[in-house]
Amino acid sequence: MTLNQFIYRMSRPLGGLKLAKYLSRNHPKILMYHRLSEYEGRDTISVDCFRNQMRTVKKYFNPITLSQLMEESKFGKAPANSVVITVDDGYKDFAEYAWPIMLEEGVPATIFITTGFVNKELWLWPDHIRYVLKNTNKEMVVIPDLGELSISTNRDNTWHQIADFCMTIGNQNKNDLIAWLYEDLRVESPEYPPGEYEAVCWDQLREMVSLGLDVGSHSHTHPILTKLNEQELICEIYNSRKLILENLGFEPKSFCYPNGTKHDFNSKIKLLVEEAGYECAVAAFPSRNPINDPYEINRYAGTKVTSIFEKNLYGLSYLSSGFNR
């Protein structure tokens, strides 16, 4: 048992969450979600779980959008007990499941959309890997640098191995590998993503924006930015901004680095994001001072595990962490 787990188990029944909330009241909690589904899946959060989490956020905290957080923090510290809910990528399940719950519970949201995905120019590369593994009749695949991987016994594990490997290689090499997978595993690649991998559409976004949805950019094609040349970077950062303006009528204030680890952006990319006119950008890992650098805002990963959700939300993770200061 880790120190964090021990503190949580011992303190929760004794009012520890309430105390942690008070002690961490000036530490904004920015939560990062991706996908929802009607029922819980390996990589999705169920509707019921998400609804319960949003009710907790609304009842005990101060939910605001990312834009509101950054605007108010200009005049000093962040609003007490502020919580920001962000959702990455722009899948249609946001419109189908997440947004109706957030409207009902009175919790605002910031969504980061991959504009090429929403524009029906592409579907996200991790879903190509899921699709081809799900639809092949072959029992295994042999990939250089990864070796022989079983498909029939554990598709999810094989997906994770291939996806993790794709994060380490260049974007063209990644696309070539995915094309090779379709060929080797004898699966035809659909032109458009099947329903379960489909994006939210512009009409849905316009309607949600009219009801208060905050929209930011998640690039145009969701590449690994650090593996692009400067011209490619400019296209990803500026094209997404332009498409949001053309389709939603405003220039987005915020940018979300694809993948969002410390290896997925650098000072050059941060500067380009700022020069493009974005007022802030978010990463995908937490820290003790999440809004200290407006172009490297830190987030907690959304989770279906109640204990982890509570530790992040109430501040136990912050109080007992070894996050970088």
Image (spheres, grey):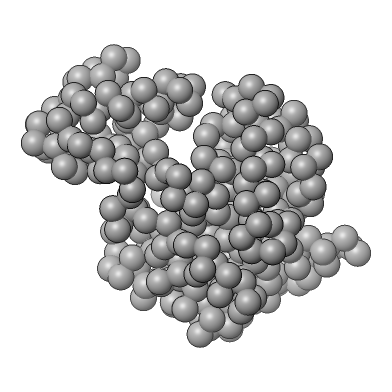
Vertical placement of residue 182 versus 281, above or below: above
**Residue found at x 91% / y 64%:** 75
| Res. 268 image quadrant | top right
Asked if residue 228 can be seen in this view, the reply is yes
**Residue found at x 14% / y 37%:** 136
Name the side, left or right, on which 36 lies relative to 184: right
Depth check: 223 or 14 in front? 223
Name the side, left or right, on which 273 lies relative to 141: right
| Res. 137 image quadrant | top left
x then y, percent, for residue 196: 30, 57
Asked if residue 262 can be seen in this view, the reply is no
**Residue found at x 75% / y 30%:** 267
x then y, percent, for residue 325: 74, 43
Vertical placement of residue 192 versus 232, above or below: below
**Residue found at x 78% / y 60%:** 70
Depth check: 198 or 202 in front? 202
Q: How many discs appear?
A: 0
- Looking at the image, the residue that sits furthest to the right is 75
- Looking at the image, the residue that sits furthest to the top is 144
Depth check: 302 or 170 in front? 170
x then y, percent, for residue 209: 62, 71
- Looking at the image, the residue that sits furthest to the front is 246
Depth check: 7 or 308 in front? 308
x then y, percent, for residue 100: 47, 78
Name the side, left or right, on which 86 lies relative to 147: right
Vertical placement of residue 167 versus 274, above or below: above
| Res. 257 image quadrant | top right
